[in-house]
Structure formats: C-alpha cells, structure tokens
Amino acid sequence: MAARDPLLTVLKLASEAEEQAALRLKAAQLEAQKRKQQLDALNQYRLDYMQQLTGQQGKQISANYYQQFHKFIQQIDQAISQQLRTVASANTQVQHRQQHWLEKQQKRKAVELLLEHKAQKRERAEAKREQKLADEFAIQQFIRR
C-alpha cells in the first residue's frame, strides 16, 4: 500500500527539484567566485602598474608618458568598476538561487514529514488492531477454560 502512495511520487519530484536547485546554486557560486577572482586580478594589475610609476620616481619622465600612464589607469579603473558591477550581479544571482534552493528543500522536508506522520498513524492503527486481536484471543482462551 505504501509503495502506491502518491506522496512518494511527490517526494521524488521534490527531491529532484531540490537537487536541480542545488546544482544551479553551485554553478552560481562558482561563477561569482570566478568574477571575484577576475576583479582581484584587475586590482592587482592596477597595483603593479602603479608601482611601476613609483619605480620611475627620481627619473625624468615625459609628459606624454605620464598622460598615457594616467589614461591607462583610467581604463583599468573603468574595467574595475564594470567588474564590480558584474561581481555584485553574480552575488545577487547566488542569493536568489540560494533562496530558491532553500524553498525546494523546505518543500521536500514538508513532504517527508507528511510521509512520516502517515507512517506513524499507520503503525498506531496496526498496533491497535494487533492489540484487539490479542485481546479477542485472550477472551476466547478464557471462555474455553
């Protein structure tokens, strides 16, 4: 009887949905991590480039070199700003997918709880039936004596 329980089908579907949500969450987390690493690389590149200018202190540098340097730093800063937006977007995606996964997990747990309550109810009914049979048997034994 329990094998035909529609709740088992619901549980299977809920578990599959939770697994899919977990996979999507993991993918979003990996993507966010990748974007953060790219941001870190851009920041490190900017720092390295700034250190090159610091290494030029005391030496004569042309105005043209300084302008090109400044323009390049601005381009790196723009790339960093864009990457910051990308990281924020990826983090938002992680939050949404985590919430979705939590909802799917909650649904699965609710179905499991329903199945557990149903099984306990069935066990109580079975125990009651067995007790009734045992009582009837005892009464029959008593009457036969």
Image (cartoon, rainbow, N blue to C red):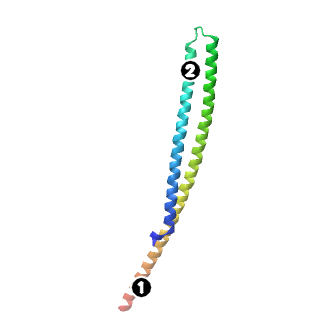
| Residue density around tag 1, few if under 14, some if 14–19, many if 20 or more, within 10 Å | few
Residue drawn at (55%, 14%) of the image: 55
In the displayed structure, would residue 54 be above or below residue 131? above
Which mark lies nearer to you, 1 or 2? Answer: 2
Task: Name the amino acid type tagged 1.
Answer: Glu
Residue drawn at (57%, 51%) of the image: 100
Residue 124 - label: none
Residue drawn at (62%, 36%) of the image: 85
The percent coordinates of residue 132 (x first, y second) are: 44, 81
The percent coordinates of residue 1 (x first, y second) are: 45, 73
Q: In front: 66, or 18?
A: 66
Residue 49 - label: 2
Task: Name the amino acid type tagged 2.
Answer: Tyr
Residue drawn at (36%, 91%) of the image: 144
Measured Cα–Cα span from mark 1 to mark 2: 93 Å
In the displayed structure, would residue 26 be above or below residue 73? below
In the displayed structure, would residue 85 be above or below residue 54? below
Q: In front: 29, or 124?
A: 29
Secondary structure at badge 2 equals: helix
